[in-house]
Image (cartoon, rainbow, N blue to C red):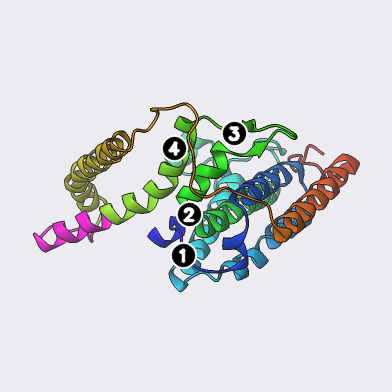
Amino acid sequence: MKGLFRYEQKDTVMHRLDPRVKLVWVFGMSVLSMLFGAPSLLLIAFLSTLPFWVMVKPSSAKIRAILFVFGTMVFGFMLTQSIFYYWGDPTNPTFTIIPETFPVIGYITGGIHFYAEGALYGLIQSLRFMTTVSAASVFVASTHPSELLVGLVRFTKVPFTNIRIGFPNEIAFMVSSAVGFAPSMIEESMIIINAMRARGLEIRGGIRTKIRALRHIFFPMVVGLLRKGRQIAIAADARAFRATKNRTFVDELQLGRGDYIMLTYIAVFLVAGTYLSSIGFGGTAPGLG
């Protein structure tokens, strides 16, 4: 799983795109996933992110991780929504898993039923999340945290002036640090688990064994993360972070031909999606629209 959130240094089309353009693309896909309500359109939106995965040329570990995340997402959303679905007719389930007359569980829950409308709604929600997660994962895999920092701080320039519009340095630094912190956290937890196994800690087994093992793993991981955060803070202070209001950057971001092509693609996709949503393909829960 650690490969899912890690930047991979390569020379691909996506790596060469301006980080601001990729941010706009992720935002656009997130908006489309909220606008669409038809499963077919959501599937098209999700499939539209796959060519960008091909451009990134991900490692096998990243492919396995993203497939695991997507599979878990679809299964979890469809299962939970098919059981806990509140918009359909509660007196007309597709079939009953546990009847009301079943001892204890049936009495407490009033019966557990499966609703086909809920499964469809779960599929819609999973496609929405998968579209956003897929685009965001491509962005993380192809964008170095330093490029993300520059893109957030110097997002755009006011025409005919030297005024730059962007996020405050503190917020940009926090976001770029968080992007690089996730793989470090996963890697730290794996190191702790391997160290505890070498000392004889038993992890495999029932729930009790796992809870006992989690107690021994949790505190070293928290201490390690706090130590990592302190190191980042010391490094920022050593480089005079926030010493001046307007920072200078070695590399200035400039849009190229590929960036303008990508922006045109995003604009066309957003306009088409907004139009389709306005004529009746917007998001509604099955059973309400």
Tell me the tag on residue 166: 3
| Furthest-left residue in this view | 199
Percent coordinates x, y for residue 246 in the rendering: 50, 30
Is residue 95 at all visible to an observer of this figure? no
Q: Which amino acid does label 1 sit on?
A: Gln
Rate crowding at label 2 as few (under 14), some (14 to 19) or many (20 or more) other CA atoms within 10 Å: some
Q: Earlier in the sequence, mark 4 or mark 2?
A: 2
Tell me where residue 203 sits by quadrant.
Answer: bottom left
Mark 1 to mark 3: distance in Å?
26 Å
Q: What residue type is labelled 3?
A: Gly
Label 1–label 2 contact, CB within 8 A: yes
Mark 2 to mark 3: distance in Å?
18 Å
Q: Earlier in the sequence, mark 1 or mark 4?
A: 1
Percent coordinates x, y for residue 135 in the rendering: 61, 54
Circle 2 residue = 144
Circle 4 residue = 173
Kindly state the secondary structure of the residue where label 3 is placed.
loop
Up/down of 42 relative to 289, above or below: below
Up/down of 204 relative to 179, above or below: below
Q: Is residue 216 left or right of residue 74?
A: left
